């Protein structure tokens, strides 16, 4: 109908170079993984094309479907995905986002290279990266069983995506998952009731066990194997449970249903039952939590990276819209209050991205003490801030942001996820308390890292001085009651110190002035002086650049 002309609407979002648009990422690669720029450039070019955005929308709209039986009644327990899901995950595997980093030389910056790719490709669609994250994270846990590691890690590190449900030896590459939580326990995995009975004559060799029980949340159920926890007389123990046994027969893996989730809809999350399912021992009996915690640490790092990616993509979409839309006689981006909101969103995003990549560098550098506490701090803070930031970015678009086809609505539905999975905010805050008590070297490593920014700002110096004294609060009887406040302060101190070290001076100054002492503040309430000094820089660092 010719009732009106479509005016004052921004062009469809897309065709942007996610690498060139992100000076924080570019600088981090130059600093910590200079050889990785080519890989990041290749993935950014792929993301800028028209197809990935279509795949993302299709994979989210056409959710996985469970098929428990075939046409004649045989139990098959398979999940059908839309072809777009396979396209997305094929790109991720093909760019080395699985376990390849664990097979690279220690001084190659491989984990930062992989982190950059994960962060970039997450901005296209996040849900399919759940199995990619578990594949990456399975490798360090499998090292507790050298024979299994030798068989499985090369397949998990492959750049060939092979979705066929067949025996490992016949596959070009493999995907891993995990199953820890049960109905009665959730994060309290020591309450698990799944049991393991040894059977050395089993198909998985002398460490074969039969598992009986269930898992309440088992994502990516078409993965080739799962790290799971089960009870032995010595306590909770870790096992590797393959979907297909070496002789090609299916393992007992009865899918009960798929979860109907708020977001993350392209990724299947299932409830599964084990009835004499074969699994191989990983690590020592009774040490299952300690064994699988290496996997949890790696997936938590990906939670931070994924949340930082969601923040960045939300910021880009807000910047895109407000730079093309006019209201009340000026571009939205030029309106005084929007000139406060957008730089504040940019500050939040830049601090999250820098922290995530610094933690990936800690893995490369073998800084286990710093990584131990830094990942828990980042998981608590960055993941929790993502939903707040996504909501603010959505408001920048107004009603358009609330419409699914725009893309920001999917980001908003996805935003709370990483703060829940792999330990909710409370779990991670308490984990930081445990680290300060049981692993004082981690506190010292945190103080050392933050201390590298000493001398730039008196307010930050005072916070750095408080790190070790704050750690002593962990011994207090009411420490759990204060855990969130403690970890929030540590997170902001760490982010501020990293910005002082690695960001433009006006950006670091803006973060210190606005965040230290103002944890509960609303985004978009920067002091006018900060907007005057840092606003233009922050806006320039948040504007999307066209590819090509």
Image (cartoon, rainbow, N blue to C red):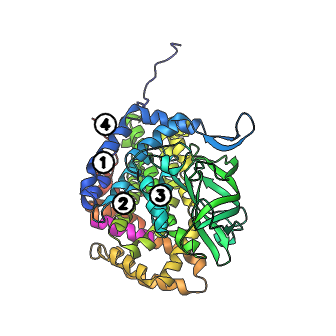
Residue 494 included in the magenta stretch of the image: yes
Q: Residues within 10 Å of mark 3 (few under 14, many from 20)?
A: many
Q: Residues within 10 Å of mark 1 (few under 14, many from 20)?
A: some
Among the two numbered marks 1 and 4 on one chain, the one whose residue lies closer to the N terminus: 1
Q: Residues within 10 Å of mark 4 (few under 14, many from 20)?
A: few
User: Which type of secondary structure does the marked residue at label 2 adopt?
Assistant: helix
Dots 4 and 2: beta carbons under 8 Å? no
Residue wearing tag 1: 39
Compared to residue 346, the image places residue 78 above or below, namely above
- In percent of the image, x 42 and y 38: which residue is there? 321
Q: Could you tell whether 458 is left or right of 487 in the image?
A: left
Query: Which circle, 1 or 3, is nearer the viewer?
Result: 3
Q: Could you tell whether 177 is left or right of 17 in the image?
A: right
Residue 326 included in the magenta stretch of the image: no
Query: Which circle, 2 or 1, is nearer the viewer?
Result: 2
Among the two numbered marks 4 and 2 on one chain, the one whose residue lies closer to the N terminus: 2
User: Which type of secondary structure does the marked residue at label 1 adopt?
Assistant: helix
Magenta part, dominant SS: helix
Among the two numbered marks 2 and 1 on one chain, the one whose residue lies closer to the N terminus: 1
Residue wearing tag 2: 103
Which residues are drawn in magenta?
490-501
Residue wearing tag 3: 152
Among the two numbered marks 1 and 3 on one chain, the one whose residue lies closer to the N terminus: 1
Residue 478 x %, y %: 60, 83
User: Which type of secondary structure does the marked residue at label 4 adopt?
Assistant: loop
Residue wearing tag 4: 546
Outermost residue, right side: 73
Decide which of 529, 357 is in the foreground and name it.
357
Distance from label 4 to label 2 (Cα)?
35 Å
Residue 292 x %, y %: 54, 68
Distance from label 1 to label 4 (Cα)?
19 Å
Distance from label 1 to label 3 (Cα)?
25 Å
């Amino acid at each position: 109908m010719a009732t009106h002309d479509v005016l004052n609407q921004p062009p469809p979002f897309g065709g942007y170079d996610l690498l060139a648009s992100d000076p924080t990422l570019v600088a981090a690669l130059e600093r910590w993984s200079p050889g990785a720029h080519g890989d990041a450039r290749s993935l950014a070019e792929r993301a800028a094309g028209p197809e990935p955005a279509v795949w993302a929308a299709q994979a989210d709209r056409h959710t996985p479907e469970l098929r428990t039986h075939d046409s004649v009644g045989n139990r098959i327990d398979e999940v059908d995905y839309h072809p777009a899901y396979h396209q997305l995950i094929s790109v991720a595997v093909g760019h080395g986002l699985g376990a390849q980093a664990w097979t690279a030389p220690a001084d190659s910056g491989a984990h930062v290279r992989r982190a950059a790719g994960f962060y970039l490709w997450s901005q296209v669609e996040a849900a399919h990266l759940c199995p990619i994250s578990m594949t990456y994270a399975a490798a360090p846990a499998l090292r507790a069983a050298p024979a299994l590691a030798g068989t499985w890690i090369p397949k998990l590190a492959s750049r060939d995506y092979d979705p066929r449900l067949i025996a490992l030896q016949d596959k070009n590459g493999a995907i891993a998952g995990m199953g820890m939580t049960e109905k009665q326990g959730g994060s309290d995995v020591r309450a698990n009731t799944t049991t393991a009975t040894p059977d050395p004559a089993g198909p998985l060799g002398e460490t074969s066990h039969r598992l009986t029980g269930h898992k309440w949340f088992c994502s990516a159920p078409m993965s080739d194997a799962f790290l799971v926890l089960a009870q032995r007389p010595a306590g909770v123990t870790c096992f590797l449970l393959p979907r297909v046994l070496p002789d090609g027969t299916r393992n007992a893996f009865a899918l009960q249903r798929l979860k109907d989730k708020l977001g993350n809809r392209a990724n299947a999350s299932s409830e599964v039952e084990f009835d004499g399912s074969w699994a191989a021992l990983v690590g020592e009996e009774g040490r299952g939590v300690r064994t699988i915690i290496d996997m949890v640490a790696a997936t938590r790092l990906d939670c931070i990276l994924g949340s930082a990616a969601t923040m960045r993509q939300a910021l880009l979409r807000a910047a895109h819209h407000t730079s093309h839309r006019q209201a009340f006689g000026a571009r939205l981006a030029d309106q005084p209050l929007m000139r406060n909101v957008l730089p504040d969103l940019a500050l939040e995003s830049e601090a999250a991205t820098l922290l995530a990549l610094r933690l990936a560098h800690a893995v490369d550098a073998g800084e286990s003490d710093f990584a131990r506490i830094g990942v828990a701090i980042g998981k608590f803070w960055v993941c929790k801030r993502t939903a707040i930031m996504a909501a603010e970015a959505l408001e920048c678009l107004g009603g358009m942001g609330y419409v699914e086809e725009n893309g920001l609505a999917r980001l908003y539905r996805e935003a709370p996820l990483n703060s829940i999975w792999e330990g909710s905010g409370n779990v991670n805050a308490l984990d930081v308390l445990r680290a300060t008590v049981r692993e004082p070297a981690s506190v010292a490593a945190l103080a050392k890292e933050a201390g590298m920014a000493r001398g730039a700002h008196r307010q930050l110096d005072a916070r750095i001085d408080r790190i070790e004294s704050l750690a002593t609060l962990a011994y207090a009887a009411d420490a759990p009651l204060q855990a969130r406040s403690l970890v929030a302060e540590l997170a902001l101190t760490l982010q501020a110190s990293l910005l002082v070290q690695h960001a433009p001076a006006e950006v670091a100054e803006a973060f210190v002035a606005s965040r230290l002492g103002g944890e509960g503040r609303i985004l978009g309430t920067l002091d006018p002086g900060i907007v005057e000094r840092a606003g233009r820089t922050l806006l320039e660092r948040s504007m999307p650049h066209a590819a090509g």
